[in-house]
Amino acid sequence: MSKEAAIDKATEYFSGGIIAKFEAAKWQEKKEAFEELCAELTEKQPPPDVIEASAKFVKAKMKDWKESNINLQKGIVALYACYATLDHVGKRTVATAMSFFVDKLGDVKLVNLIKPVLMDLAELVTPKFISNQIIKYAATAKGPKILQESCVVLTNICDEFGSSGVPLKETIDYGKLAAAHTTPTVRQAANALFVELYKHVGDGIRSFMTDIKDSTLKLIDAELDKTT
């Protein structure tokens, strides 16, 4: 659904007061708009295309997720926490905000709000879909905190849903990227991810790890040995 079609559909479906507040200049009114939209979504339980339209409408009103006001960023997270309680949330709705979520895993003010929402959404649109989306955006991220926390979320998904919850080769490739990082906390998070994968897959993961440099592999092996 195009941005224009989404704006039209959302404007038609949701109450005029909510739409007007999203257009307002003051962030306080936009914050109210988030709260009122969540209430209306919960009450009406709209079909998937309307939910998708609401997500793309909000993305447009939040400057394509470049909105810098922390209160409105929290509003985006709260909206998706609301979506996670609805009956008809599709993958396109979730994909609409995944670049925002992965980027804000690097923000200490938002990371602990985002992680549980991602786990809730994983139950709706499959953990493998969420994992693939995280890897897609985290693999090209610059901030060490984003790389680290993306490892943490992938580890949590694997712990919660088993190895079938993540795309194995892609997750290992992402782990290798993080394991080679210069920042110690990123490397530690990557090691924890490998350990979690090892618990579920066993020695099968080693066949994917042949191209890791020796010094990194020794550290990972030391961690894996602790789990056996």
Image (spheres, rainbow, N blue to C red):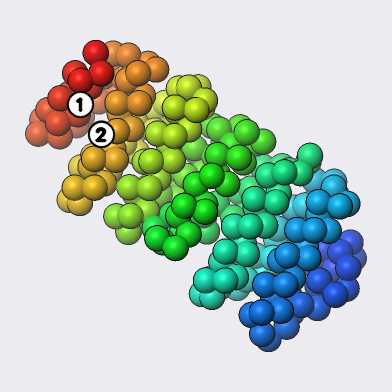
Instruction: Please determine whether, in this image, residue 160 is positioned above or below residue 138.
Output: above
Q: Is residue 167 visible?
A: no
Which quadrant would residue 111 be assigned to in this image?
A: bottom left
Please identify the quadrant where the C terminus is shown. Answer: top left
Residue that mark 1 sits on: 223
Task: Identify the residue at image location x=81%, y=51%.
Answer: 42
Horizontal side of 224 relative to 46 (left or right) equals left
Horizontal side of 211 relative to 149 (left or right) equals left
Which quadrant would residue 215 be assigned to in this image?
A: top left
Q: Which amino acid lies under the numbered mark 1 shown in the image of this protein? A: Glu
Q: Gap in Å between the C-alphas at discs 2 and 1?
A: 7 Å
Task: Identify the residue at image location x=74%, y=70%.
Answer: 33
Please tell me the numbered disc located at residue 47: none
In the image, residue 85 lies at what x, y percent? 72, 43
Q: Mark 1 packing: few (<14 Cα in 10 Å), some, or many (20+)? A: some
Residue that mark 2 sits on: 191
Instruction: Please determine whether, in this image, residue 98 is positioned above or below residue 19.
Output: above
Q: Secondary structure under badge 2?
A: helix
In primary-sequence order, the first of circles 2 and 1 is 2
Q: Is residue 108 visible?
A: yes
In the image, residue 8 lies at what x, y percent? 84, 67
Task: Identify the residue at image location x=32%, y=20%.
Answer: 198
Task: Identify the residue at image location x=68%, y=44%.
Answer: 84
Which quadrant would residue 135 be assigned to in this image?
A: top left
Horizontal side of 11 relative to 25 (left or right) equals right
Q: Using the image as rendered, state which of residue 185 and residue 49 is in the foreground.
A: 185
Q: Using the image as rendered, state which of residue 28 and residue 92 is in the foreground.
A: 28
Are circles 2 and 1 on residues that touch, CB within 8 Å?
Answer: yes
Q: Which amino acid lies under the numbered mark 2 shown in the image of this protein? A: Asn
In the image, residue 183 lies at what x, y percent? 20, 51
